[in-house]
Amino acid sequence: MIEIDTNSIKEIAEQLECNFRAYIHKKNGQMIFIPNEDVMPEIDMDEWNDEIKQLENDYANYFEIDKWTSREAFEMMNDFAEQLTDNKQLQSELFVALNKKKPFREFKFVIDDAGDYRQVWFDFRNKQQHEFVAKQLHFLNSKDEMK
């Protein structure tokens, strides 16, 4: 069973947000982060050779923490808009943005111009992302307990 602390959850969520892949050792909780080459094909992976070798040599003992899908990210934006009952105008603009052809770009355009609500969005998103990571870590621990 690995120790799950808020700092680890925060670090994993931040690395995933920066397009890194996150791995955690199933027994000792050691974390390894390497760039996601699917998202950053131009990155020079030589800087992460040690981490890559460590993963290759002990891959069965590492669990990859998944990043939220674009569908889950969309749902997160929709959930944020739904809870904005104190600002019906912004809520409406966000719903309109989410129903346009490029909803991620449109949502960002609206929220970047939303004053203090921009920070409210970042706080909401961070909390949701931390919960997403925590659920995976709890699942990993519950699988270990069944053994």
Image (tube, grey):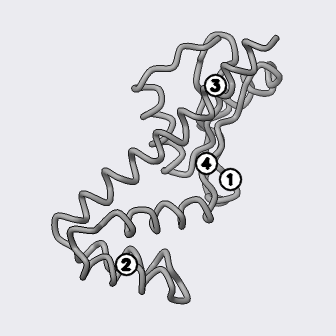
**Residue furthest to the left:** 116
Which amino acid lies under the numbered mark 4 shown in the image of this protein? Lys
Q: How many C-alpha atoms fall within 10 Å of the one at disc 2: few (<14), some, or many (≥20)?
A: many
* Residue under pointer 2: 94
> In the rendered image, which quarter is residue 81 located in?
bottom left
Question: Mark 2 falls on what kind of element?
Answer: helix
- The quadrant in which the C terminus is found is top right
Which amino acid lies under the numbered mark 2 shown in the image of this protein? Leu
Label placed on residue 37: 1
Q: Residue at x 69, y 35 (%)?
A: 64
Pick whichever of labels 4 and 1 is earlier in the sequence: 1
Disc 4/disc 1 C-alpha distance (Å): 14 Å
Which amino acid lies under the numbered mark 3 shown in the image of this protein? Ile
The image shows residue 63 at horizontal and vertical percentages of 72, 28
* Residue under pointer 4: 67
Q: How many C-alpha atoms fall within 10 Å of the one at disc 4: few (<14), some, or many (≥20)?
A: many
Front-most of residues 48 and 105:
105
Whether residues under marks 3 and 4 lie with C-beta atoms below 8 angstroms apart, the answer is no
Pick whichever of labels 2 and 1 is earlier in the sequence: 1
